[in-house]
Amino acid sequence: MARTYPPDVAVIDTDGILHARLTAGKKNANVEYGRTYRLPDETFTNAVVTPALANEAALADIVQRMKVESGKIEKISLLLPDSWFRMNFVDLPSLPDRPHEAVHIVRWSLRRTLPIPPESLRVTWEVLSRNGAGAKLLVLSAVEETLAAIERVFNAAGIEVILIEPVGLNIWNAVAVREPATTRDRLFFHIRDHDFTTAVFRGAQPLFLRSRNLSGERTLEQEIKLSASYLRDTIQAVSVERTYVAGNSVRPELHRELETEFGAPVSPVVLRDFVERVPSDVAGVEAELTACTGVFTG
């Protein structure tokens, strides 16, 4: 495992938490421990951009159980659904070196793309390229109030939160570190019951990132067709080398649909390709455990 982080990772969603503990194996990670916990209804409630933590006591109860049942947790990484974040590509004429100045400029750049004041967001970014004083950034943002409330619950239990990142990007971290270098386009889809994430990478450079909710008005297959049309028309993703698909219940028919749409082979993301040892029952959380391995490889 490349990045040095504590072994504990929690994947949080509106309906529950997966707690995993990973260690380094000879080649890949070992999942030493994995347990899911159900959250009461309305622990998180719908809100703009990021769900709100409406019941801190319910989350606190689960966090205390996690700590007791796993033996000991001092520090932890948190992964949240992609749909809890906004992912934007931003071109800035200049990016200050001082962090407090840079964050103001980055927030200001988001003011026309988000339905809430940028001051209410926690933002982080990666510099993708520079042109003189200017920079192209990939910016991740989520509602500060929700993230701070989650951190407050863990801190009250004596657990330090080391990072908070999207699930899908960490699945891609796990995939990308194992794939040979390329200059061609690679597509990545992370499919969940109620939303899906689409990403395009040209070589190592991200070109497109978007998470969409599945409203029921269109099927997933229809959404995929719309995404394919958009990608072809907007960013000319015409030299697709391979499409990667992650998800816990992805139908083979979807793989065939993607292969038809993009004319490239489809590789399902399978947990066993990323770990040496896992607990006996990981049904329904394979994608999330793959994301946990990505925390250490990005």
Image (cartoon, helix red, strand yellow):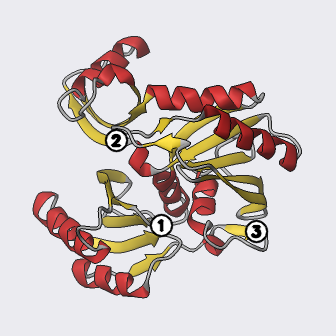
Amino acid type at image mark 1? Pro
Residue for badge 2:
86
Helix, strand or loop at mark 1: loop
Image x and y of residue 205, in percent:
34, 51
* Mark 1 surroundings: few (<14), some (14-19) or many (≥20) residues within 10 A: few
Front tag of 3 and 2? 2
| Front residue of 123 and 207 | 123
* Residue farthest along the front direction in this orientation: 41
For label 2, the crowd category at 10 Å Cα-Cα, with few meaning under 14, some 14 to 19 and many 20 or more, is many
Instruction: Please name the amino acid that badge 3 sits on.
Output: Val
User: x, y percentage for residue 298?
Assistant: 54, 48
Q: Which residue is mark 3?
A: 278
Counting labels gives 3
**In front: label 3 or label 1:** 3
Q: Residue at x 45, y 65 (%)?
A: 192
**Mark 3 or 1, nearer chain start:** 1
- Residue at the far right in the pictured view: 71
Residue 180: numbered disc: 1
The answer to whether residue 214 of the structure is visible from this angle is yes
Residue closer to the observer: 86 or 95: 86
Q: CA distance from mark 3 to mark 1?
A: 26 Å
Outermost residue, left side: 233
Q: Residue at x 25, y 29 (%)?
A: 110
